[in-house]
Image (cartoon, rainbow, N blue to C red):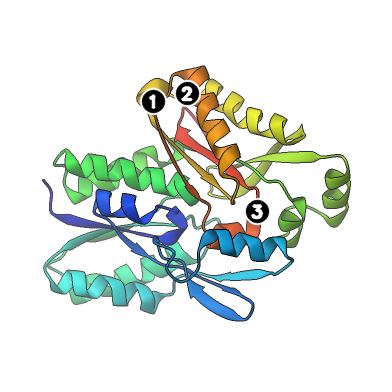
């Protein structure tokens, strides 16, 4: 097996058990709520996601912070000193400054450790879309591929990582500048639910609308049915903003309609959940296009 470290950040929304199973390292982003700053670790030991979403439902607002250059350097340097090569798979540059911080840290450390191999990739992914790309990169590493081969595989396949989202409360998208105040008010009154995706530049884009929650969830699966590559042979990832029952319903839909055998479900972490709100539901899979 190739001996190099895959390091990602907590925007990948991988749970602690899967992080351990995959043998990857996760650098936490941070979020602030009620004037207290927390780190978004995979085991959620600083704040449980359910508690975070309960605060959002009560009207509390949260802000988030990208990982800076110093934090990347602090995480990467001990690995390099221990003789490890490292592949960083970073949160989309279209949504965060995290990738740019990783790039600057990598450039500095490459000069300091010229005998080590150190690369970073802008995944152009978010939440469990990023997590699924990390999962698939680990599977390539398990085949014995070199760090360069895995890096190149990720670059070649990252735009096949499909992200289909819907949200339950339009006011969180309004607060983040994704929609206007008028659209948020009218949409809420009419029970209009946006269907969004992450595009090829790594931005969150509104692609359609559905009337009511059930229709919006069905729309995610409809899109997957059109674009998924051999869905019955895939593992599908689903993340949710404290709406597990809806996540399980979507999981059952992809199993029933496309014969999917494996589904992994986890929370949308606070870093992304702060901007999408409770009731966010996201479906991730490998497809022909985003």
Which of the two discs, 1 and 2, labels the residue nearer the N terminus?
2
The front one of 25 and 290 is 25
What's the distance in space between the residues labelled 3 and 2, CA to CA?
A: 25 Å
Name the element at disc 3: loop
Looking at the image, can residue 117 be seen? no
Residue at mark 3: 278
Question: Is the residue 208 above or below the residue 35 in the image?
Answer: above
Q: Position of residue 19 (x, y in %)?
A: 31, 54
Question: Is the residue 143 above or below the residue 47 in the image?
Answer: above
Question: Is the residue 16 above or below the residue 279 in the image?
Answer: below
What's the distance in space between the residues labelled 1 and 3, CA to CA?
A: 27 Å
Residue at mark 2: 255
Which of the two discs, 3 and 2, labels the residue nearer the N terminus?
2
Q: Position of residue 4 (x, y in %)?
A: 17, 56
Mark 1 neighbour density, 10 Å: few (under 14) some (14–19) many (20 or more): some
Mark 3 neighbour density, 10 Å: few (under 14) some (14–19) many (20 or more): many
The answer to whether 127 appears left or right of 245 in the picture is left
Question: Residue at coordinates 28% horizontally, 59% vertically from top-left?
Answer: 119
Name the element at disc 2: helix
Question: Is the residue 164 above or below the residue 121 in the image?
Answer: above
- Tag 1 and tag 2, C-beta contact below 8 Å: yes
What's the distance in space between the residues labelled 1 and 2, CA to CA?
A: 6 Å
Q: Quadrant of the N terminus?
A: top left
Question: Residue at coordinates 34% horizontally, 48% vertically from top-left?
Answer: 134
The answer to whether 60 appears left or right of 26 in the picture is right
Q: Position of residue 16 (x, y in %)?
A: 35, 56
- The dot on residue 37 is none
Name the element at disc 1: loop
Question: Residue at coordinates 53% horizontally, 78% vertically from top-left?
Answer: 37
Q: Position of residue 104 (x, y in %)?
A: 37, 71
- The dot on residue 261 is 1
């Amino acid at each position: 097996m190739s001996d190099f470290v895959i390091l990602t950040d907590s925007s990948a929304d991988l749970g602690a058990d899967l992080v351990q199973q995959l043998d990857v390292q996760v650098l936490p982003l941070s979020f602030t709520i009620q004037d207290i700053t927390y780190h978004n670790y995979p085991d959620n030991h600083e704040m449980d996601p359910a508690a975070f979403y309960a605060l959002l439902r009560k009207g509390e607002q949260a802000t988030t912070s990208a990982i800076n250059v110093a934090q990347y350097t602090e995480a990467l340097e001990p690995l390099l000193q221990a003789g490890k090569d490292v592949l960083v798979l970073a949160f989309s540059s279209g949504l965060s400054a995290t990738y740019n911080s990783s790039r600057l840290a990598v450039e500095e450390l490459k000069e300091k450790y010229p005998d080590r191999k150190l690369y970073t990739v802008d995944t152009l992914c978010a939440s469990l879309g990023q997590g699924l790309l990390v999962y698939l990169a680990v599977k390539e590493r398990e085949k014995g591929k070199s760090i360069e081969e895995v890096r190149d595989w990720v670059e070649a396949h990252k735009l096949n990582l499909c992200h289909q989202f819907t949200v339950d409360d339009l006011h969180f998208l309004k607060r983040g500048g994704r929609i206007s105040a008028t659209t948020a008010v009218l949409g809420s009154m009419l029970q209009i639910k946006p269907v969004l995706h992450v595009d090829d530049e790594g931005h969150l884009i509104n692609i359609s609308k559905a009337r009511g929650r059930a229709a919006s969830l069905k729309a995610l699966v409809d899109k997957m049915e059109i674009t998924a590559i051999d869905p019955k042979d895939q593992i599908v990832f689903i993340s949710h903003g404290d709406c597990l029952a809806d996540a399980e319903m979507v999981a059952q839909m992809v199993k029933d309609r496309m014969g999917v055998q494996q589904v992994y479900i986890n929370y949308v972490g606070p870093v992304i959940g702060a901007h999408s709100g409770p009731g966010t539901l996201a479906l991730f899979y490998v497809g022909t296009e985003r």
